[in-house]
Amino acid sequence: MGKNASAPAQIRALSGNNDGIPDLVGDLRNLTTLHLFDCDFSSGRGQSIPSNLGGLTNLKLFRVEAANMVGTVPFELGLIEGLHELRLPRNELSGPLPDVLITPVKPMRHLDLSENVLTGTVPARFLESPQLVELRLNGNRLSGQIPSLQLSTQLVRRSTQTPPV
């Protein structure tokens, strides 16, 4: 018997992947975990997060740490309804935070975008999700007030920077 083509898949690129995330990863519709670590995408023009990853409807965890990723956090990542863990710390991601990453009806539990060069304000809806237990945004260039924790009774780890006065 052959392998079930619809079975969940995981990709873990272990140390030394310096070629970036190939666009064809966006075609792996059954991918549930994409975890790249000990990578360095700084060679050449840098590597951005392919927007076609937004089509990975079964993706639950996406993690790329300290890999010198550049560009923005794609809006399309917010379209993945089942994504519950997004960790992109210690990269060179810039621009505003897409407010669609977290909504009250999404299962996002862990969001770590710390130590990038993100700008703009923290969308209020980031703290309106009852499922969110970890939010890390420290080490960015965010401005404005950090929204209150009124509805986020489950939030156990919050690491945000205090905006400059």
Image: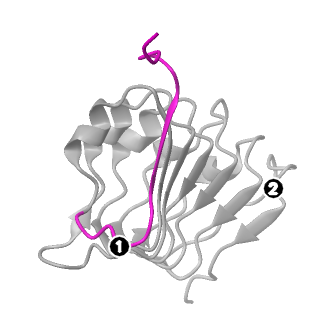
Q: Nearer the viewer, mark 1 or mark 2?
A: 1
Q: Which residue is mark 2?
A: 155
Assess whether residue 8 is covered by the magenta stretch: yes
- Local secondary structure at mark 2: loop
**Separation of residues labelled 1 and 2 (CA atoms):** 35 Å
> Crowding near pointer 2: few (<14 within 10 Å), some, many (20+)?
some
Residue farthest along the bottom direction in this orientation? 165
Q: What range of the chain is rendered magenta? A: 1-19
Assess whether residue 6 is covered by the magenta stretch: yes
Residue farthest along the front direction in this orientation? 1
Q: Which residue is mark 1?
A: 16
Residue at 71% from the left image edge and 42% from the top image edge: 129
Residue at 75% from the left image edge and 41% from the top image edge: 131
The amino acid pointed to by label 2 is Leu
Which image quadrant for residue 116?
bottom left
Residue 130: image x %, image y %? 78, 41
Label ID, residue 131:
none
The amino acid pointed to by label 1 is Gly
- Secondary structure mainly formed by the magenta segment: loop
